[in-house]
Amino acid sequence: MSIKSYALSFILFYILVFSLSSLFAYMDVQKLNDNIVKKNLSSGKAELIKAIEQLVTEHKLIVKEFSIWDEVRQQLDTPEYYSYWQTHRLLKSGKLPDFFIEASIYDEKGNTLNKISTITLPDTISTNNIKSYFKIVNNKIQLIIISPILKGNTGEKTDLIVGYLATKSIILSQLKRVKQFNHIWVDSIKLKLLEKDHIEIKQLIDYLTFDIKENTESIHISNHIKQILLKNTLILVAFALMFYFLISYFLSRPLRQISNYIDTLENQPELQQGQDIDTQFHIHELETVKLSLHDYQKKLQIVYSNLDEKNQELWELAHHDALTGASNRRAFEEHWANISKIFSESRCHVSLILFDVNQFKSINDSYGHPIGDEVLKKIAFAIQKVLRQGEKIYRIGGDEFSAILYNCTPEEATLIAQRCQAAINELSFASENIKEPIRASIGVAHNDIHNSSSISDLLWQADIAVYSAKKPGQSNIVTYSEKIKNISSTILSTRINNLVFDAIETGSNIHMFYQPIINLINDKIDYYEALLRIKDDNDIIAPGKIFQLIEAKKLDYELDIIIFKQIANDLEQGKIPSETGVSINVSGPSIIHSDIVQQLSIFSPYLNNYKIVLEITETSLITNIDQATESIIQLKEIGFLIALDDFGSGYSSISYLSTMPVDIVKFDISLIRQLEDEKQFSIINHLANMIGETGHLLVAEGIETVELKDKIKYLGFNYAQGYLYGKPSPLIKQ
Amino acid sequence: MFYSIIKIIIFIIVLLSFFITPAIGKPVNLKISEKITANAEYYLGDKTKPSILILHGFLLTHNFPTVKRLAESLHESGYNILTPSLSLGISLRKKSLACEAIHTHSLEKDVQEIALWIQWLQKQSATNIILIGHSTGSIHLAKYLSQHPSEVIKKIIFIAMPDFNSSTYSNQTPQLKKEAEQLLKINNHSLHDFQLSYCKQYPSSAENYLSYLQLSQENLVQALDKIAISKILIKGSIDSRIDQHWSNQLSQHNVNVINVNGANHFFDYEHEFDLLDIIENILNEK
C-alpha cells in the first residue's frame, strides 16, 4: 500500500473512531436529556404535590383562623340567625378569601345548624374522623376542609369542641394564581376527570395532568454540546482532509518522486545529472534523502565511468596478446563468432589467413624463449603492417597468427598473404643473433559466396591449408581447395574432432584398454600398459588418429588428465589385478606442465599396492629436459617408476640416458623387429647390454612370437609386451 | 474608650429590658347566661387603692387601645383595674363586633353584664370603685349607675361620651325607629338591617335595636341626674362626636367637663398622656 493509502486508512479510521466517540457522546447527551426530562417530570410532580400541600395548608390555616372568629361561635350559641348569617354575612364579611366559595357550620354532633338549599356542603359530617378532602365537580377541584370550632376560642387542642366548620374552596385557579412553578407549565395543569366525589389530599396528583417545562438550561447545554460535537466533527474532517493533503503534498509526492527517480535509476543507471529531481522538498529529511540520492547517483556515475574504463582496460587485456600487442585468441573467437553471424547470410567475400611460424619450437629451444618472443613480436608487427585498414592480426597460438579479411576476393586474399609472407621473409633477426631464415607457413581459406554455410568451414579449411603448407615440398602459402581436403582425414574428420573434444571435456566414450607386460623371469604379468581408446558407436577410433589430432590441436595435457582420472577410477574399482601394476603414458607437454605432479598425485593411494610406471617419450624429454627432469625426480620420490618410451624410434642421443632419472627403458617396436637382422641384432644386443648395465630395466614391445621372446630374453630384457602375451583389452573386475 | 463605655451601657440597658415586663391583665371569664360567658382583664394593684372599671366603646373590646393604654397606665400607678368586654351576645368575644354582624345584644343585657362585673369586683373585696367609660361605654356606665346606685362606686369618669342618638355619627333615624317599633308591635323578632351609631347596616331584632334608641339626650340627662357621685367628662377639643351643645348640657347636669385641647375622640398620640394625667388627678382628688 502507498503512504497515501495508509494515511487515508489512518484518517478514515481516526474519523471512524472520533465519529463513534462523538456518537456515544451524543447518545450520552441524549440519555442525559432523557434523565433530565425524567427528573423534571419527577421534580414537576413533586413540585405540584408540594404546591397542593402548601395550598391545602394555607387554606387550612385560613379556615382555622376563620373558625375562631367570634361570629362563628355566635352561630352555635344563637343558631336561629344562622340562615341570615350564612346568607348575608358569611362570605361578605371578608373573613374568608374569595376562593372560598362555601362554608357551613355544624353542631358538636356534626349536623348542620341549618340546611340551606344553596349550600352544597354536606348536611352532616362525621365527627369521628375529621379529614379534609378534594372533590371534583364539573371538572373543577374543590377542597373541602373541616375544622373543629372550640369553645374557649383559644385555639388550643384541650379546648372543648362545640361545633365544626366546613369550607369549600377552589384549588386549581389558586394553584395557577398563587404558586410559582419551576418545572411545569401552570396553565397545563388539567384534571383527568369531570366528577369525583372524594379524593384524598395526597391522591389528587393522580387525577392531574400537566406539561413539564423544558429545562432550557439543559436544552441549551445539550444543544451546545451537540453543536460542539458537530463543530469538532467538522473540524476533524477539515483537519483530516488537510492532513491528507499535507501528507500527499509533503510526504507522498516527494516519496513518489524519489521512488520514480529510483525506478529510473534502476532502468537507466547511467542517468545524467540533469535528470535529477528538481523539486525542493519541504520536509528536511526527504530533502536530505533526495540530496543523498543525487550525491549517490553522482558517485555511482563516477564508479560507472571508472568501471567502463576498467572494463575497457580489461577488455583490452582480455583481447590482446601481451607479448605481441596483437589481438589474442579470445578476441579472434569473439570476432569470428560475429563474423559468422554477420556474413553467414550475406554474399560478401570473407577470407581467413592462418600463419604458423616454422620450426619455432627449435628457435625457442636453440635461442631461448626471450629470443623466441622477439621473433613473434616482429612477425606480428610485420603482418599487421601489411594488413589493410580495419583488419587485425590475432595471435591464436604460441606461434600461430591469423587475419580475417572482408570484401576481399580470393585473389586479393592470396595477394595479401603473399605480401605478409614477403614482409616476414624480409624481417631481419640479426639483432637476435638468429642466423637461419625464419619462415611462416600460411594457409588461406575463402568462403563460397554462393554457399551461406561456408563461413563456418573457413576455420578448418584454413587449418588444413596451413597444415598442408608445412608439408615438405609445399609452397609456404596454401589456399584451401578440394585437392587438399583429404590430406589429413583425421584433421578433416569433424566427427572424430567432436568425439575427441567431447572425451576431453566430459570423459565420455573414453575406454582404457590394458596390455599385459610380462616379467621374463617367471613369464607372469608384472603390470599392464594403459592404452587410450575412444569409441565411435561400436567402432574404436584408431589411436594414431587421436594423437595426430591431439598433437595438432595441442591438447596433450588435457587428454592426459582425463586418462589419469579414468585409470584412477579403474584402480579404485579394482579392475587392475592386485600385485600387478599399471603403466601410464604421459605426453611431452604434460611432463613439463607445472601441475603434473599434483595431477598425478591422484595415484598416491595406490602406490603401495600397485606398481605404477609413467611412460615418457624421449622427444618430450628433449623438448624441455630441465623441467622434465625436475618433475620426474619429484614423481620418483613419490613412488612412481619412470619408463622411457619408444626408445630408438627417434634420434635421441644415448647420452641422455645417463642424465635421465628413468628406471625402465622401453625399446620401440621398430628396434625389436630389427632383431631378425643379424647385424641389427648385434647392435641392439650391445645397446641392451649397455643400458642394462647402467641399472635400467628393459622392456621389449611387439613380442608376437616365442622366437622373438627367446631372443629378447637372451638379450637381457626384463619385460616383454606384445600379442604373444595379450592384446590391449578392457580389464574386468576380478 | 468613651464609645466603648457607651456601648457597654447600651448593652446592659437592652439586657435589662428583657426583664421589665409590661403590666399584663389577668383574663377573667364571667358567666353571663347559660350560653354566654363574658371576658375581661383584671389588673390587680395596690389593695389600698381604688378599683377602677374601664368600659370600652360601641361594639369594641377591652383591647381597644384607648382602654388598654389607660388600664395599663393606671395599673402602673397601683390601681386595681377591670376592663370587661361586653359579650354583645357572643360568648368569650375577642374581637370588635362588626356592624354587619348579627346583633343579638341589647342595652339592657349590656347593663346587666356591667352589673355582674361590678358584683364580681365587689367579690374581689373592692370597696372603692371608680367607673371610667370611653365613648358609648360611658353611656352604658351612666345607664347602669342610674339604675344601680352603689356606695362602693365613688366616681364616674366619662371619656368622650357622645350624644348617642343625635351626633353627626349617628345613623339611626326616626323612620328606622318607627319601623322597629312596628315590627315589635307585631312581635317580629327576626333580624332586620337597621342603622345604629356609625353602623349603616346593623342586623338586629327590632326589640334589641330599640333598646339602644333609648339613649336619647333626654334619657341620658335623666340618667345622669340620677347619679349622685362625682361625674367628670373628659373630652377632646376636636372630638366631633361631642358638640358644644351636648357638652354644655352635661355641664348643666353636674358633669365636670374637662376639655383637652387638640385631643380627638380617642385621645391619640400625646393626648394619651394628657388623658392619663387628668384621670390621675381626678383619682387623687378626695
Image (tube, rainbow, N blue to C red):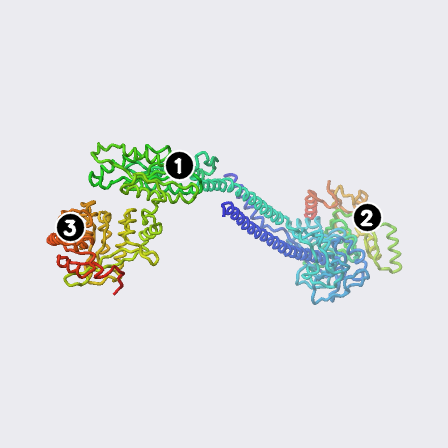
Q: In this picture, is A568 found above or below B2?
A: below
Report if residue A236 is visible in the image: yes
A72 or A165: nearer the viewer = A165
Task: List the residue tagged with mark 1.
Answer: A409
- The residue at 17%/63% (across/down) is A523
* Dot 1 amino acid type: Thr
Task: List the residue tagged with mark 3.
Answer: A661
* Dot 3 amino acid type: Pro
Q: Which mark is residue A267?
A: none
Residue A410: x and y in percent read 38, 37
> Which secondary structure lies at badge 1?
loop
Mark 3 chain: A
| Residue count near mark 3 (Cα–Cα under 10 Å), binned few <14, some 14–19, many ≥20 | some
- The residue at 88%/51% (across/down) is B175
Which of the 4 image quadrants contains residue A295?
top left
Cα separation between marks 1 and 2: 178 Å
Residue reaching furthest to the left: A693
> Which secondary structure lies at badge 2?
loop
Q: In this picture, is A214 found above or below A473?
A: below
Tag in front: 1 or 2? 1
Which of the 4 image quadrants contains residue A391?
top left
Q: Quadrant of the C terminus of chain A?
A: bottom left
Q: Which mark is residue B170?
A: 2
* Dot 2 amino acid type: Ser
Q: Earlier in the sequence, mark 3 or mark 1?
A: 1
Report if residue A318 is visible in the image: no
Mark 2 chain: B
Residue B151: x and y in percent read 73, 55
Left of A705 or right of it: where is B204? Answer: right
Tag in front: 2 or 3? 3
Which of the 4 image quadrants contains residue A103?
bottom right
